[in-house]
Amino acid sequence: MDEIIKLTGLTKKYGKFTAVDHLDLSINKGEVFGLLGPNGAGKSTTILMLLGLTEPSEGSVSVCGIDPISRPVDVKKRVGYLPEDVGFYDRYSGLENLMFTAQLNGMSKAEAFDKATKLLERVGLAENADKKTGVYSRGMRQRLGLADVLIKDPEVIILDEPILGIDPYGVKEFLDLIIRLSKEEGLTVLFSSHHLYQVQQVCDRVGLFVSGKLLAEGDINSLSQKLFGNNAYTIELGISGSSGNGEDTPEDIIKNIDGVISMNQVKGKYLIECSRDVTPEISKEIINSGLNITSLNKKEYGLDDIYYHYFEGGTKNE
Amino acid sequence: MSNTAKDIQLPGGNQITKLLDKLLGKRTAALSTKVTRPFWVLVEKEISDQVRSWRFIILIAIITLTTLGSLYTALTNISDALKTVTDPEKAYVFLKLFTYSDGTLPSFIVFVSFLGPLLGIGLGFDAVNSEQNHGTLSRLLAQPIHRDYIINAKFISSLIVISFLFFALGFLFMGIGIIAIGLTPTPEEFVRIMMFLFMNIIYVGFWLNLSIFLSVRFKQPATSALTGISVWIFFSIFYSMIVNLIMKAIASPALLINPMYQIYLERIKLALMRFAPNILFSEATSTLMIPSVRSLGPLTMEQLSGAIPGPLPLGQSLLLVWPHITALIAASAVCFVLAYVPFMRREVRSR
């Protein structure tokens, strides 16, 4: 696959503080990549370096085969960037704001008007095109921001915290919009976020970012494999009643099953960590012992778990 | 709006509608298919922002009112001014309009030297920081333009606005003057007035650059506006007091009988005063507009003896103010560089 963004040994230091630490990352054409991490992890700094808006202390960047440090304007022709908490000129309407961006990208007024009208239609702002952006809601501003990014016909779009501060329904709508548009146009999308759940749904691949380092990258499945390699499964079990022979506690029964690593009781339920999928065995053994199963649930690791495992666990271990 | 325009049925109503739409900035009018270069797109937007802003309307109202006021005093008193004076400036009746005051209202040139800085500061104090605070700066920087386009466009557009303003005011002043006193300016007077207007633009340009620098330096527009205004007040009120204090401190009373020492002191004082841009400006404008000003420094009796009082020719007046013009342009350039370098280096994050 073609690498459209390639970072090698990228480092950014502010005085003694290292914001981005020897980052290696490549993103393929047409991919939707999520850059995840807590606040201050260096996501925005990385994005700024991708656009040539700040110079790296070390390492190299290549975007669409161009070095953004020496040729920022050429990169900006191909890359659309939606900054975090984007602002518009409040005195102008949404349409005028878009036309202004279009003209800065070398379009004539007539072209800009056509293009802006079409894009406003696509992001669902056609009715509000002539309203001043000062009265736009947060979600509308983000959608206008997306149109603003798309108006230059980019190859890559980079969105910095695009779903921050939008309500859950708006987030879903907005992400669907990004994905739909990017698939239609064959765009590469890179976005940063700390909203794990939503990102998980739309990203082809994610990179986990903590204090300037990329801890892991890959799709969600491979990440959880990587992170929870030895105890890859957690089973949640709820039981009621007492065992028929009155001797074996649930702990004894379950611990005897091959593959079970540990077992904890949390809020009346048992959390069983195991190295393989032992759900069928557990249910068989419990029923044989005369207990009743009220719930049996195989938990799959989501980004949240990955996130906490890394960020919480990571800091604890240090 | 377009409905009302369409309701008017006139011969060629269609054209009128189109024209109206165009004037009102309506999109129904055919949009240009010409590609404007990004830099001029920015300039165009800045100019339209400037002229539509309330602050510009207020500033222009203040300046127009003072202009009309000073014109009125000059016109009502011009006959007295010409009768009483046996001065060599009789030939320069027209220039008197700009410089004459009976004491009730200051003359045009005094007004401009006082209000010019306010205009410059008013147009530039939020140039960069308001873009930053509205989160539009990072969006602008993500467009395929060079970074300096932004700051250059801010400067150029304000300068264009100022130039239009001053030339419009100057010509208005001249036009009313011609109608009222029935005299036309001589070519020399015309050139002097043009030079004077040009000086105004340079002077306001200096304050504009200073305030753009402050807008890069300070995050809050209020801080940069206040700083700009305090610099202005410092130079227009306190600076001469401070210079006088310094002169008092360094003058040695024992030596004061020596005239050469006095001249020496006077020279130091003048040199110190000329660090203030408003002093430079008022020296330059009075030389240009009052041709009988022959020297800006102290003159000895010997230098004056035998001199026939008469106006300086245009060339000589220009020669006298040339250093002033250079100094003002240099000061503007310094401010611009001070604004430019940090702006180019700065890392722009969203607000």
Image: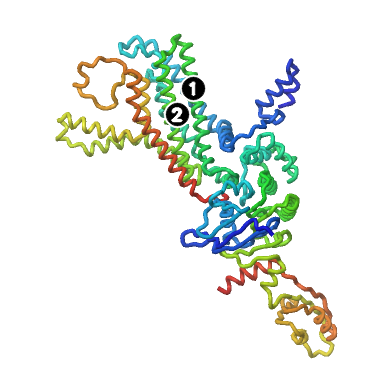
**To which quarter of the image does residue A47 belong?**
bottom right
Work out whether residue A137 can be spotted: no
Mark 2 belongs to chain: B
Q: Is residue A123 left or right of residue A60?
A: right
Pinpoint residue A64: horizontal percent, then vertical percent: 63, 53
Pinpoint residue B280: horizontal percent, then vertical percent: 35, 30
Q: Would you name the residue on which mark 2 appears? A: B201
Q: Residues within 10 Å of mark 1 (few under 14, many from 20)?
A: some
Question: Which callout, 2 or 1, points at the residue further toward the start of the chain?
Answer: 1
Q: Secondary structure at mark 2?
A: helix
Amino acid at circle 2: Ile
Mark 1 belongs to chain: B
Question: Does residue B195 lie above or below A34 as drawn?
Answer: above
Amino acid at circle 1: Leu
Pinpoint residue B260: horizontal percent, then vertical percent: 17, 30
- Using the image as rendered, state which of residue B324 and residue B208 is in the foreground: B324
Disc assigned to residue B169: 1
